[in-house]
Image (cartoon, grey):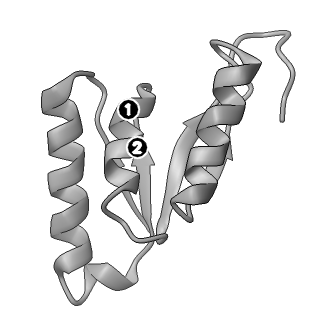
């Protein structure tokens, strides 16, 4: 597995995640390796999911904001064919 982590948000971060995902999935060697797409910002992760053709792991979903947003992100990850890593988030939150 290869982990791509982008810690900032915004259009530039989304473009960088997309670029790296496309670069790694277009190479004959790295295309065979699952990618872990890591960011504290869902839009950045989703940008990578759009480019990985179901061979990725979204890191990480959490209930940090709301249960509805968590469900929406999980549904999108499923639609993209991605596995997910789920973190607990803040102390005392439910774990799914």
Residue 50 shown left or right of residue 9 in the figure = right
Question: For this rendering, which residue is in front, 94 or 47?
Answer: 47
Please determine whether, in this image, residue 57 is positioned above or below residue 43: below
Q: What element carries label 2?
A: helix
Where, quadrant-wise, is the N terminus in this rendering? bottom left
Measured from the top left, where is residue 55 in percent x and y? 47, 71
| Corner quadrant of residue 7 | top left
Please determine whether, in this image, residue 1 is positioned above or below residue 87: below
10 Å neighbourhood of mark 2: few (<14), some, or many (≥20)? many
Residue at image position (57%, 51%) is 77
- Would residue 83 be seen by someone viewing this image from the given angle? no
| Corner quadrant of residue 81 | bottom right
- Would residue 93 be seen by someone viewing this image from the given angle? yes
Measured from the top left, where is residue 93 in percent x and y? 82, 14
Q: Which residue lies furthest to the bottom in this view?
A: 28
Residue 73 shown left or right of residue 19 in the figure = right
CB-based contact (under 8 Å), mark 2 and mark 1? yes
Residue at image position (15%, 41%) is 15
Query: What residue is disc 1 on?
Result: 43
Residue 25 shown left or right of residue 93 in the figure = left
Q: Mark 2 to mark 1: distance in Å? A: 5 Å
Residue at image position (24%, 46%) is 17
Residue at image position (58%, 58%) is 79
Please determine whether, in this image, residue 28 is positioned above or below residue 81: below
Where, quadrant-wise, is the C terminus in this rendering? top right
Query: What residue is disc 2 on?
Result: 46
């Amino acid at each position: 597995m290869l982990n791509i982590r982008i810690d900032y948000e915004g259009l530039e971060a989304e473009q960088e995640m997309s670029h790296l995902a496309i670069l790694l999935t277009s190479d004959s060697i790295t295309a065979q390796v699952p990618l872990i797409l890591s960011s504290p910002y869902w839009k950045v992760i989703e940008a990578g999911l759009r480019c990985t053709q179901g061979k990725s792991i979204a890191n990480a979903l959490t209930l940090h904001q709301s249960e509805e947003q968590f469900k929406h992100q999980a549904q999108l990850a499923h639609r993209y064919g991605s596995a997910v890593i789920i973190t607990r988030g803040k102390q005392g939150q439910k774990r799914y």
